[in-house]
Image (tube, rainbow, N blue to C red):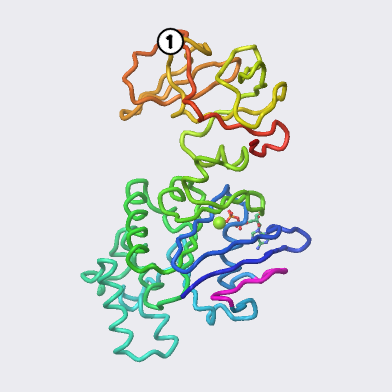
Amino acid sequence: MGSVALRDIRKSYGAVEVLHGIDLDVTDGEFVVLVGPSGCGKSTLLRSIAGLETITSGEIAIDGASIVHLHPKSRDIAMVFQNYALYPHMKVGENMGFALKMAKVGKDEIDAKVKKAAEILSLTPMLDRYPKQLSGGQRQRVAMGRAIVRDPKVFLFDEPLSNLDAALRVQMRAEIKELHQRLRTTIVYVTHDQIEAMTMADKIVVMKDGHVEQIGSPLALYDRPANRFVAGFIGSPAMNFLPAKVQGGQTVLEDGTVLCPAPAGVAEGISFTAGVRPEHLSVASTGAAGQVTLVEPTGAEIQFTVDLAGTPVLITTRDRLALRPGETLHLAVEPGQLHAFDADSGLRLE
Ligand code: ADP
Ligand code: MG
């Protein structure tokens, strides 16, 4: 078992509060990803769960029992860091078994646990190598192996893939997800990369400035972002935002261009921020017109930018359109794919 409950977690450094009351429930076996821009408090929250930071107030419980008073070693948690922190003078097997040795576990038991973890992580042929004889991805796996041998209730990962190149990051992302599907251990995973969050998580926690902005499944956050920040943070390329108003039942842009029908829940005459994802816009024969300013083929798709009522709007398409900068196009929004946010608070309307 390994459920985690955080209640009203606050953390201050001196007079500066950096976590402003975080509530979160992680169910046993769940893969939860904390995501948000650098400095929003992800590491501080993770380190607080591990006991490496002392929280200023609040409650942290594992399987219903408070762990706030417990030393990090007694919390039944294993943490994997960005920089792996392997011992260079110890072989892979020794690195993986070291925590157990320190805990006075018998040699046979350590060997058995290291052997099993090495099999899980495809590290068996590398047990007698030193860390410097491994690739970045293999070192990352050793760091995970060190956590696995301890058989903790909860795994904590702090940006474990940040030191890897792009291709390896994609591979390790899949490996960690597969590992979770096999072991079914509770994971709380920190990243600033929304693609990592989307692809790996059962549940995403979007953070900003020491607050939780929204908690939900990857697709729930994509389909119904609770506010403009989440809308712009989740999804790649990012959602377009346009100042708009409801007039005659239509979404009308600042220069009078009619974009699409008014979204549900926004009354006649109300100004709002219209949000539309690049993949939910397409070229049409009539409708909102704008000038193409940039064409960027990525291979699988073409990304192009259209100036719409003075706002650059990005569109992605899988159609091999022959687009030229300077030409005028009509755009259509896929029905039901317009998001509406309060012009001031940024909160989702409806
Ligand atoms: P993230 O991991 O999301 O990038 P952190 O949790 O590391 O963010 O930091 C959150 C905030 O707390 C930042 O503003 C950071 O400057 C501040 N902070 C982190 N550690 C300390 C510390 N030891 N002393 C003072 N401020 C800190
Ligand atoms: Mg961090």
Does 188 appear in magenta?
A: no
Ligand 2: give its quadrant.
Answer: bottom right
Residue that carries the numbered disc 1 in the rendered image: 285
Quarter of the image where one finds residue 186: bottom left
Residue at the image point whose x is 51% and y is 12% from the top: 287
Q: Amino acid at mark 1?
A: Ser
Q: Is residue 262 above or below residue 11?
A: above
Quarter of the image where one finds residue 252: top right
Q: Is residue 144 above or below residue 300?
A: below
Quarter of the image where one finds residue 109: bottom left
Q: Which residues are magenta?
A: 54-64
Residue at the image point whose x is 48% and y is 19% from the top: 332
Toward the viewer: 107 or 270?
270
Residue at the image point whose x is 49% and y is 66% from the top: 156
Element type at marker 1?
Answer: loop
Q: From the image, which quarter does the C terminus lie in?
A: top right
